[in-house]
Image: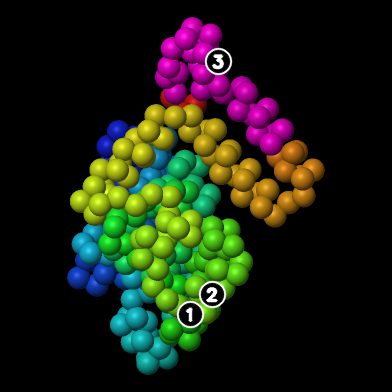
C-alpha cells in the first residue's frame, strides 16, 4: 500500500502489481487503516484511490482464499464483515471527496470500491466486471447498493448475473464512470480534479455526500429536514462567510475547509 500527499490530496495506491492488486488480508487491513487515517487528517481534503501496474484491483486474492478454505479456516467467511464492509463504509462516509482513478481491470470488490467512490475517472484500458457469480458468490463490498444507483436496477442485475466485462467506452455510456482519458494521462487528470476539490469547501462537500446518501432512502419530508439541518450548520462555517464576502468583493473565494 503506497500513501502519498501533495496539494491537499492523499493518493492511496494498491501495490501488488504482480497479482493485479488482488486483495489479501494484509492489503485489506492496510487499505482500511489508510482510509481511516485520511478521514481523520484535516490536512487531507481529497483522496484518490488507484492501483499500481496494469490493474486497479482484481478483487479478492483467490489463491489466499482457496488456501484458507482447504485448511478449514473460517477467515474467508468473515472477511466481508471484517474487511469489505468497513472499507466501503470508510469510502462512502469519508468526509471529503474520493476519486477512483481506474487503471486497467477493476473486478469484484475492486470494482465495488470504485462504485463506492464519489467520482470515477477511467483510463482507456480500464474495464469493470462484477465477477462474483463466476465464483459462486453473490455481490459484496456494497455493490448491490452502489451499482444500481449508478446504472439502474435492471442493468445492475444484468451485469451481476452475466459477470461480463465492461470496457471503458461502455462504462462511460452506462454511467459507471464520469470521464475516460488516455492511460498515460489518468494519474495527472485524477490529481488535477482532486486538487480542485481539495481547494474547495470541504465541510460542504461532506454534507453533499451525506445528504444525498440519506435522501436515497428517505421521504421528501425527511430529505428536506436533512437539507435544512445541513444548511444551518454550513451557514456558520468560515468557508460560507468567505464565499459570500468574495462574491460581494467580486473575487474568487479562498476556502480553508473550515
Query: Vertical placement of 71 versus 186: above or below?
Result: below
Mark 2 → mark 3, Cα distance in angstroms: 47 Å
Region rendered in magenta:
227-255
Residue at the (24%, 72%) spot, across then down: 19
Q: What is the residue that sits farthest to the top in this orientation?
A: 249
Nearer to the camera, 233 or 188: 188
Q: Are marks 1 and 2 in contact (CB under 8 Å)?
A: yes
Q: Are marks 2 and 3 in contact (CB under 8 Å)?
A: no
Q: Nearer the viewer, mark 3 or mark 1?
A: 1
Residue with the mark numbered 2: 158
- Mark 2 surroundings: few (<14), some (14-19) or many (≥20) residues within 10 A: few
Where on the picture, by quarter, is residue 212? top right
Residue with the mark numbered 1: 162
- Mark 1 surroundings: few (<14), some (14-19) or many (≥20) residues within 10 A: some
The answer to whether one can see residue 211 in this image is: yes
Mark 3 → mark 1, Cα distance in angstroms: 51 Å
Residue at the (54%, 74%) spot, across then down: 158
Residue at the (57%, 39%) spot, across then down: 208
Q: Nearer the viewer, mark 2 or mark 3?
A: 2
Magenta-colored stretch includes residue 196: no
Query: Vertical placement of 213 versus 232: above or below?
Result: below
Q: Name the dominant secondary structure of the magenta segment.
A: helix
Query: Vertical placement of 178 versus 207: above or below?
Result: below
Q: Earlier in the sequence, mark 2 or mark 3?
A: 2
- Mark 3 surroundings: few (<14), some (14-19) or many (≥20) residues within 10 A: few
Amino acid at each position: 500500500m503506497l500513501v502519498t500527499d501533495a496539494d491537499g490530496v492523499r493518493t492511496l495506491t494498491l501495490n501488488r502489481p504482480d497479482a493485479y492488486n488482488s486483495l489479501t488480508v494484509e492489503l485489506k487491513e492496510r487499505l482500511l487503516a489508510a482510509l481511516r487515517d485520511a478521514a481523520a487528517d484535516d490536512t487531507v481534503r481529497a483522496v484518490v484511490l488507484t492501483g499500481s501496474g496494469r490493474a486497479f484491483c482484481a478483487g479478492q486474492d483467490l489463491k489466499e482464499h482457496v488456501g484458507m478454505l482447504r485448511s478449514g479456516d473460517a477467515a474467508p467467511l468473515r472477511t466481508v464483515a471484517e474487511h469489505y464492509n468497513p472499507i466501503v463504509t470508510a469510502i462512502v462516509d469519508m468526509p471529503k471527496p474520493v476519486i477512483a482513478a481506474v487503471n486497467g481491470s477493476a473486478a469484484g470488490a475492486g470494482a465495488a470500491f470504485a462504485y463506492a467512490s464519489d467520482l470515477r475517472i477511467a483510463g482507456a484500458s480500464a474495464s469493470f466486471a462484477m465477477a462474483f457469480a463466476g465464483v459462486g458468490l453473490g455481490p459484496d463490498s456494497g455493490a448491490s447498493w452502489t451499482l444500481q444507483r449508478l446504472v439502474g436496477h435492471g442493468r445492475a442485475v444484468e451485469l451481476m448475473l452475466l459477470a461480463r466485462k465492461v470496457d471503458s467506452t461502455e462504462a462511460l455510456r452506462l454511467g459507471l464512470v464520469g470521464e475516460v482519458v488516455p492511460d498515460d494521462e489518468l494519474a495527472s487528470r485524477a490529481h488535477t480534479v482532486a486538487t480542485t476539490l481539495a481547494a474547495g469547501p470541504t465541510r460542504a462537500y461532506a454534507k453533499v455526500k451525506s445528504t444525498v446518501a440519506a435522501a436515497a432512502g428517505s421521504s421528501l419530508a425527511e430529505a428536506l429536514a436533512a437539507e435544512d439541518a445541513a444548511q444551518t450548520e454550513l451557514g456558520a462555517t468560515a468557508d460560507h462567510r468567505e464565499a459570500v464576502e468574495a462574491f460581494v468583493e467580486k473575487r474568487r473565494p479562498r476556502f480553508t475547509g473550515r
